[in-house]
Image (cartoon, grey):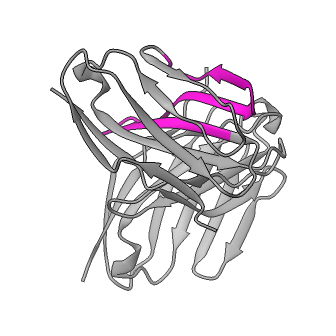
Amino acid sequence: NAGVTQTPKFQVLKTGQSMTLQCAQDMNHEYMSWYRQDPGMGLRLIHYSVGAGITDQGEVPNGYNVSRSTTEDFPLRLLSAAPSQTSVYFCASSERTGYYNEQFFGPGTRLTVL
Amino acid sequence: GEDVEQSLFLSVREGDSSVINCTYTDSSSTYLYWYKQEPGAGLQLLTYIFSNMDMKQDQRLTVLLNKKDKHLSLRIADTQTGDSAIYFCAESPYGGATNKLIFGTGTLLAVQP
């Protein structure tokens, strides 16, 4: 199994540009989520999905869109990039047990918005 | 609201014990977790503890849970340079009824040879 994969690994955008961060998992996990990691702030939840066709907002959803058309894929879209979105983005997946759950993380995408 | 706090930095010498502390707020958290992030990588689950336990030992790792004070700690015995990483504690709020995790700010552990 490849686990959780993310592309690209690095990206530089100009303010106002749009882009999609890709995330895929091959473990048949129902639950997937996107976090951003900023220095001194830990990981903050952006959006999450409990299964195909179902998404919901996390702690910091503004400026981001998600969709979940398949179990495997959970792309994150930046509609109009802003410098405040400069961060490292992690995608994670887990089985939808609702109790103990190990979240499996991708390697991250480092995004810089100029 | 939910908030998980950790100190930002810990420096130890190789061979010493490391203790990383965490305080959390949601008393209904069913499981509490420790994740490790090595440089340039994603997070990996290191260990976890069920909320009805006080202590869990796993080789060099000891997790202590004080539910009254909502305090969680991770002790690493005989710390090695390969243990240098950022350590995150995380709680599962809402009684674990969802897969959501609330992460702390992370503690950077620097191991000096």
Q: Quadrant of residue B4?
A: top right
Q: Which residues are magenta?
A: A32-61
Which quadrant: the N terminus of chain A?
Answer: bottom right
Which quadrant: the C terminus of chain A?
Answer: top left
Q: Residue at x 67, y 77 (%)?
A: B58
Q: Residue at x 63, y 82 (%)?
A: B59
Q: Taking the image as drawn, is residue B68 in sight?
A: no
Left or right: A21 as drawn, with respect to A50: left
Figure label count: 0
Q: Residue at x 76, y 43 (%)?
A: A30
User: Residue B1: x and y, percent?
Assistant: 61, 20
User: Residue B68: x and y, percent?
Assistant: 73, 41
Q: Quadrant of residue B50?
A: bottom right
Main secondary-structure element of the magenta-colored stretch = strand
Does B47 sit above or below residue A66?
A: below
Left or right: B9 as drawn, with respect to A76: left
Q: Quadrant of residue B92?
A: top right
Does A15 sit above or below residue B48?
A: above
Taking depth in this image into account, of B34 and B14 the one nearest to the observer is B34
Q: Residue furthest left?
A: A114
Q: Taking the image as drawn, is residue B104 in sight?
A: yes
Q: Is residue A49 magenta?
A: yes
Taking depth in this image into account, of B18 and B85 the one nearest to the observer is B85
Q: Residue at x 50, y 18 (%)?
A: A61
Q: Is residue A79 magenta?
A: no
User: Residue B110: x and y, percent?
Assistant: 29, 67
Left or right: A32 as drawn, with respect to B42: right
User: Residue B53: x and y, percent?
Assistant: 81, 58
